[in-house]
């Protein structure tokens, strides 16, 4: 016996037969939850270079940022604020472009403060890499958070301290006793110039190269095996040191003793040279103002505008009054909503009570039954007999007819009952009448058809004779039909059809 081959299932059948299982929800570790997360968005006018700058800024803030965040014009800042608590977002950076300037706003979620910077210059990451003499980009370095380096933020002024604290809190903190040097592959440098009041932002990757080794050996240890096609033996490659370019000359200031083993060639307690490769972006900006709240709060610091103590106090009173009016409007709106809900509930209660009152009770049903019996008992014959017994004469016909038509007393019907005392019309079965008509029509057709065949119908011989007999009365007793002897010959007006061949 051959086994029957089963037909392969279609894609729709496979999807239908697939058992749906709930996706497992993996909880994030506490270290990732507590780490600062950022949103990087852009506002204002559209510009391709600004959108590329926002993508470079997101890449710099990886891995604790929304790298593929999609934003639309209809989205507002409040929308991102509402999502911040769900995604553990601690900071939001907004690149806002106007007709005059480009600004960068750094916001501490969810209630501020807000730092506003004016961007003087910026360079995209791709331009920085293309202009570098030696291009080096390690994709694995973006899997860990960068190291933050602050320079010259120790001057006088509270705004400097707040600015330095904000930049530090944007990146996860480092525990020196437990940190692994292999995880520190990038760094973000923020340098403040007290003369020009500009902040320079730079982004680098960190590499370590062992020293006190032959250049050929260093290349083999630190990198993949190079191309040895030009050499007859590997000893030729090791002995020749001209393969190292001038840009890789070691600087004594960059020599450090490693406390941990990084990778092959960079071993513990050995000297290595640290090198920085800039990968962009570059941003040069200046602090303009600091606000207490989320974008709309009291101005704590302004770079160009200075106000006296009296003006500051007046602004505080005005802001407090606006806040009070806003709370009053919210409270009034809440009260109005509550009133509308109470009105709806009262209306529902009234309508439900009316529906219950309109229902017929048992007593109402009994009253309706008595009314029907009373109407059915009253008749004209009873009234006429009573009239004869009382008066001794027959009443007139019009006496009781007029009384029953208009002056008859109606029985009591309860309020709200949809009941009528009028007698219902008998329901006619029109379908039966139509069937009877169809039967009669079929019988007449059958009768006519049978008469033509058997000679008993209208067009049969006997029927024709009877009809002709009837017509002879109106023709003066003359028989106009053709019998065996034939009828009168036609004369004139007609053509004789005769055949010359047959005689």
Image (spheres, rainbow, N blue to C red):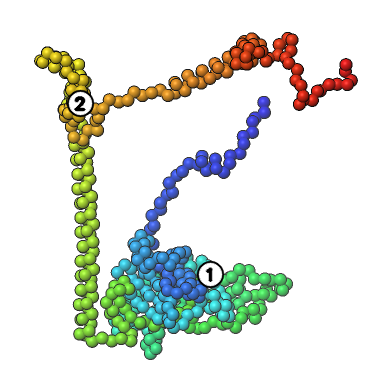
Q: Considering only vertical position in the picture, is 17 above or below 135?
A: above
Q: Is residue 307 visible?
A: yes
Q: Which residue is mark 1?
A: 138
Q: Is residue 369 visible?
A: no
Q: Quadrant of residue 9?
A: top right
Q: Position of residue 198 (x, y in %)?
A: 40, 85
Label 2 neighbour load within 10 Å: few <14, some 14-19, many 20+: few
Q: Quadrant of residue 214?
A: bottom right
**Front residue (pair 386, 142):** 386
**Front residue (pair 102, 92):** 102
Which secondary structure, mark 2?
helix
Q: Where residue 342 is drawn, which disc sits there?
A: none
What is the residue that sits farthest to the front in this orientation?
476
Label 1 neighbour load within 10 Å: few <14, some 14-19, many 20+: few
Relative to 459, 16 lies left or right = left
Q: Position of residue 117 (x, y in %)?
A: 38, 79
**Front residue (pair 223, 64):** 64
Q: Position of residue 15 (x, y in %)?
A: 52, 43
Q: Residue at x 89, y 20 (%)?
A: 501
Q: Considering only vertical position in the picture, is 291 above or below 140?
A: below
Task: Report if the CB atoms under discs 1 and 2 are less than 8 Å apart.
Answer: no
What is the residue that sits farthest to the right in this orientation?
501
Which secondary structure, mark 1?
loop
Relative to 33, 18 lies left or right = right
Q: Residue at x 88, y 16 (%)?
A: 503
Q: Which residue is mark 2?
A: 402
Q: Quadrant of residue 144?
A: bottom left
Which image quadrant: the N terminus? top right
Circle nearer the viewer, 1 or 2: 2
* Marks 1 and 2, how far apart at CA: 113 Å
Q: Residue at x 18, y 23 (%)?
A: 399
């Amino acid at each position: 016996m051959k086994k029957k081959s089963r037909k392969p299932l279609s894609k729709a059948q496979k999807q239908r037969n697939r058992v749906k299982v709930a996706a497992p929800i993996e909880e994030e570790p506490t270290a990732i939850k507590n780490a600062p997360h950022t949103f990087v968005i852009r506002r204002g006018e559209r510009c391709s270079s600004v959108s590329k700058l926002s993508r470079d800024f997101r890449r710099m803030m990886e891995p604790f940022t929304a790298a593929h965040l999609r934003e639309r014009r209809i989205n507002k800042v409040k929308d991102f604020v509402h999502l911040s608590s769900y995604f553990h977002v601690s900071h939001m950076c907004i690149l806002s472009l106007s007709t005059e300037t480009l600004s960068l706003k750094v916001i501490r979620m969810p209630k501020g403060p807000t730092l506003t910077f004016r961007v003087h210059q910026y360079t995209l990451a791709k331009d920085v890499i293309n202009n570098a003499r030696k291009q080096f980009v390690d994709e694995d370095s973006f899997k860990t958070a960068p190291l933050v380096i602050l320079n010259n933020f120790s001057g006088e002024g509270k705004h400097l301290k707040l600015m330095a604290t904000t930049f530090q809190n944007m990146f996860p903190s480092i525990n020196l006793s437990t940190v692994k040097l292999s995880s520190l592959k990038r760094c973000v440098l923020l340098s403040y110039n007290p003369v020009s009041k500009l902040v320079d932002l730079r982004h680098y990757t960190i590499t370590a190269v062992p020293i006190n080794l032959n250049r050929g050996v260093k290349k083999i240890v630190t990198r993949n095996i190079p191309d040895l096609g030009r050499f007859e033996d590997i000893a030729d490659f090791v002995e020749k040191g001209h393969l190292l370019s001038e840009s890789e000359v070691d600087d004594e200031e960059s020599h450090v003793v490693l406390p941990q083993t990084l990778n092959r060639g960079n071993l513990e307690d050995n000297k290595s040279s640290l090198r920085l490769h800039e990968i962009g972006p570059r941003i040069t900006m200046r602090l303009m103002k600091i606000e207490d709240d989320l974008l709309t709060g009291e101005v704590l610091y302004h770079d160009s505008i200075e106000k006296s103590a009296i003006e500051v106090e007046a602004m505080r009173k005005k802001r407090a009054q606006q806040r009070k009016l806003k709370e009053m409007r919210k409270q009034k709106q809440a009260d109005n909503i509550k009133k509308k809900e109470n009105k709806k509930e009262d209306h529902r209660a009234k309508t439900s009570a009316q529906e219950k009152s309109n229902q017929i009770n048992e007593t109402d049903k009994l009253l309706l039954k008595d009314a029907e019996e009373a109407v059915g008992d009253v008749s004209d014959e009873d009234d006429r007999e009573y009239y004869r017994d009382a008066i001794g004469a027959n009443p007139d016909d019009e006496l009781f007819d007029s009384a029953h038509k208009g002056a008859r007393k109606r029985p009591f019907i309860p309020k709200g009952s949809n009941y009528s005392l009028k007698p219902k019309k008998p329901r006619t079965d029109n379908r039966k009448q139509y069937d009877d008509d169809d039967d009669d029509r079929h019988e007449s057709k059958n009768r006519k058809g049978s008469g033509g065949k058997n000679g008993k119908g209208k067009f049969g011989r006997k029927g024709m004779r009877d009809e002709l007999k009837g017509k002879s009365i109106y023709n003066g007793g003359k028989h106009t039909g053709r019998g065996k002897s034939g009828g009168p010959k036609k004369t004139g007006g007609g053509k004789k059809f005769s055949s010359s061949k047959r005689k």
